[in-house]
Image (cartoon, grey):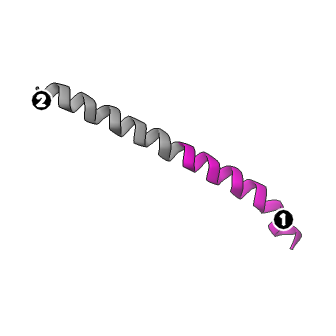
Amino acid sequence: MEFVGLLAPVAFVFAMSAIGQVNSLKKEVEELKEELKKLKE
């Protein structure tokens, strides 16, 4: 059980960083879409 207790904070930090990466990817995709719209005009 102690092993799981040690893993919990690591898993939490890993999850938070993964969420951050997903959010930054979404922003990049939105920026790319805007650039594509400008190019099409």
Residue type of the residue flagged with mark 2: Lys
In the rendered image, the vertical position of residue 7 relative to residue 38, given as above or below: below
- Structural crowding at the residue carrying mark 2, measured as other residues with C-alpha within 10 Å and reported as few (<14), some (14–19) or many (≥20): few
Q: Residues within 10 Å of mark 1 (few under 14, many from 20)?
A: few
Q: Which residues are magenta?
A: 1-20
The quarter holding residue 39 reads top left
Amino acid type of the residue that numbered disc 1 sits on in the rendered structure: Gly
Instruction: List the single residue furthest toward the right.
Output: 2
Mark 1 lies on residue: 5
Residue 23 position, x and y percent, is 49, 43
Labelled disc at residue 40: 2
Percent x, y of residue 31: 33, 32
Residues at discs 1 and 2 in contact (Cβ within 8 Å)? no
Nearer the observer, disc 1 or disc 2?
A: 2
Q: Name the dominant secondary structure of the magenta segment.
A: helix
Image vertical order of residue 40 relative to residue 6, above or below: above
Could you tell whether 2 is left or right of 25 in the image? right
| Element assignment for label 2 | helix
Q: Is residue 16 above or below residue 11?
A: above
Ranked by sequence position, the earlier of labels 1 and 2 is 1
Indicate the position of residue 20 as horizontal and vertical percent values. Answer: 56, 43
- Which residue is situated farthest in the bottom direction here? 1
